Each structure stands twice: as structure tokens, then as C-alpha cells.
Image (cartoon, helix red, strand yellow):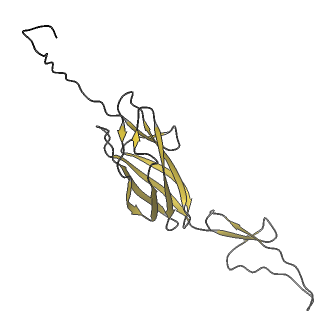
Amino acid sequence: NCDSSESSYDINVTGTGSAGDIQIERPSGTTKNDGSTDAVGNMAAGVSTPLVYTVRNTAGLGNILLGVLTADTFVNCSVVVNQPLTTTLIPGAITTFQLDVTPTTGAAFSFSLRLPSNDANENPYDISVTGTGLAGEIELERPSGTIRADGSTDTQGTVTSGVLIPLVYTVRNLAGAN
């Protein structure tokens, strides 16, 4: 500086920082808005089913800093939470997390999902998850296509004593549960 009257210049610089904007999707590309419900449909009771969610920073500026993902308020289910693969999302970046959901019985189930972040208007990001557990339900048929009701009698008519008669029954698992 060659100005003898000013040894230095003082300038105040102000501005507003911009955090990212978080968005959660399941499946990837289908947004689950903050405060919404993710209806996951039917799941076999007693069987763990993975649900994979995508977390996206949709902002043009600012990073998203993710906190610890939690699930709580369980009704008729248990949930194993697998944390997001990364906790810092630059603009346009994504990460995923997985929930392993096990309905306890053949009935409605639900739980709450909560992901804190530095997003100014969606912190924490809350989603209610609902579904229906299906208990195993079998059907017995003989011959195939002819349903035998529980407690019914399958009459064979007159048979010769000591002669082996092969009977083939088909058992179908109608609910998809184990």
C-alpha cells in the first residue's frame, strides 16, 4: 500500500451460509417427504425384510451433515438400523442406509424413523413406516387343486388290507411366511 494516510484497509464482509437440502427416497427416485408415511405393504411375520433408503443432498450449495439414524415407537415389529455409509453429503451426493424389519406377528406393524442433519427446515427428517405382517397360512390339497379343509376326512373307499396305496398331498404356503 502506497497510501501514507491509510496503513491498511478494513472491510466488513457479510453473507449467509447455505446448508444443503436433504431428501429421503425409497425406492431410489421416489421421495418420502419429511413427516410422511412410508407404507411398505405386506411382509412375512418372523422374517427379516431389508428396506433400503437413499439420502440425497438436492441443494446447489452447502453440505448435508447427517447425525445418528434412529428407529423407535415399535408396534408389532423389530428393526435393525444400518447407518448411512457416509455422514457428509456434498451438493448432489447420495448415500444409503438399510433397515432390516421383522414383523412379530400376522398383524399391522409400525415404527418411526428419524434422521437428524444440519438441514434448516427438515431437522430431524421424520418418516413413519407402516405395513402388515403376514402369518404363515397353509392349504392342503389332494389331488392337486382340490383343497382339503382343516379337520376334514379324506376317504379312500374300500382298500385291500396290506396293499400300499400312494397318496400325494400338496401343501401350499399362502402367506409367504416361514
The N terminus lies in which quarter of the figure?
top left
State the residue lying farthest toward the bottom.
161
Q: Quadrant of residue 5?
A: top left
- Left or right: 124, with 103 as reference point: left
- Left or right: 55, with 173 as reference point: left
Rendered position, 60 above or below 23? above
The residue nearer to you, when weighing 11 against 20, is: 11
Which residue lies at the image location 54% right of the left edge and 55% below the top edge? Answer: 50
Q: In which quarter of the image is residue 144?
A: bottom right
Rendered position, 12 above or below 157? above
The residue nearer to you, when weighing 161 against 64, is: 64
Rendered position, 28 above or below 10? below
The residue nearer to you, when weighing 170 against 75, is: 75
Residue 153, x across and y down, in percent: 75, 81
The C terminus lies in which quarter of the figure?
bottom right
Rendered position, 152 above or below 61? below
State the residue lying farthest toward the left.
5
- Left or right: 104, with 90 as reference point: right
Which residue lies at the image location 86% right of the left edge and 83% below the top edge? Answer: 157
Residue 28, x across and y down, in percent: 52, 40
Which residue lies at the image location 67% right of the left edge and 76% below the top edge? Answer: 150
Residue 118, x across and y down, in percent: 31, 41
Residue 48, x across and y down, in percent: 54, 62
